[in-house]
Amino acid sequence: MTAVRRRLASTTLAAALLGGAAVPAVVLAPVAAAHSVLLSVDPQDGAVLEASPGQVTLAFNEDINRTFASVAVTSGGDRTNLVVGEPVVDGGTVTVRLGELSAGEYTIGYRATSADGHVIAGSSVFTVAGASSAAAPAGTAGAASEPGASSATADQQLTGASESQDPDSGINPALWVVGGLAVLLIGGAVVLLRRGG
């Protein structure tokens, strides 16, 4: 009977060690692969509009955390955020209202956190056409001619609030579950081995 207990304990211990190594890969692989992405933005990137848009709408493939959604709309070298009010989050859609925009180029900067804690950030550019666009201030033209200048301005609008609220530093709950199961299995195997001795 002692030999049977030892064999059972050895088998349990081996299963616990193998299971502890294999299960995290199976459990965490879908989590790592299922990151959120931006599906569309309205106005579209590169769009030229005849009139000022009343709002900006961002559509993501997953639900967005209402607490961690930031959108900024800026013009050229001006760092003023032209968004009116707070973003409205409805599932995977984030909408912000805009005041009346004059002719010129505008950058949409966004930073959002999906329900699974993944952060999505980026920028998009659109232009409002009009008679005054040909006589845009020199500062606006200079910022538009330098790659990344408008994007950097919009990103600066989002940095302050999002850096202090970034929830990406937590540990995945699946790791706690798998670790707990492995500890229980190994503990049981050790008890069986001691009794067998």
Image: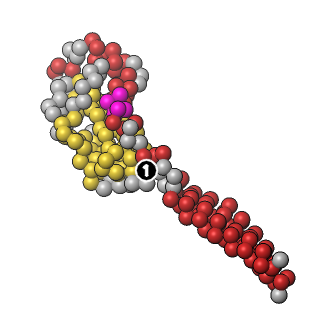
- Give the labeled residue for mark 1: 117
Q: Is residue 189 above or below residue 32?
A: below
| Viewer can see residue 163 | yes
Query: In this view of the protein, which residue sits in the foreground, 126 or 10?
Result: 10
| Viewer can see residue 124 | no
How far across and down, in percent of the image, does residue 6 sit?
81, 78
Dividing the picture into quarters, in which one does residue 2 lie? bottom right
Whether the magenta-drawn stretch holds residue 13 is answered as no
How far across and down, in percent of the image, does residue 179 sit?
60, 62
Residue at point 38%, 38% (across, down): 164
Residue at point 39%, 54% (across, down): 115
Outermost top residue = 138
How far across and down, in percent of the image, does residue 86 sit?
22, 42
Instruction: Answer left or right for 70 relative to 169.
Output: left
Q: Amino acid at mark 1?
A: Gly
Instruction: Answer left or right for 28 relative to 63.
Output: right
User: Mark 1 falls on what kind of element?
Assistant: loop
Residue at point 30%, 19% (across, down): 77
Q: Is residue 99 above or below residue 90?
A: above
Q: Is residue 115 above or below residue 127?
A: below
Outermost bottom residue = 1
Q: Is residue 143 above or below residue 182?
A: above
Quadrant the N terminus occupies: bottom right
The boundaries of the magenta stretch are 156-160
Dividing the picture into quarters, in which one does residue 163 lie? top left
- The majority secondary structure of the magenta stretch comes to helix
Q: Give the total number of marks visible in the rendering.
A: 1
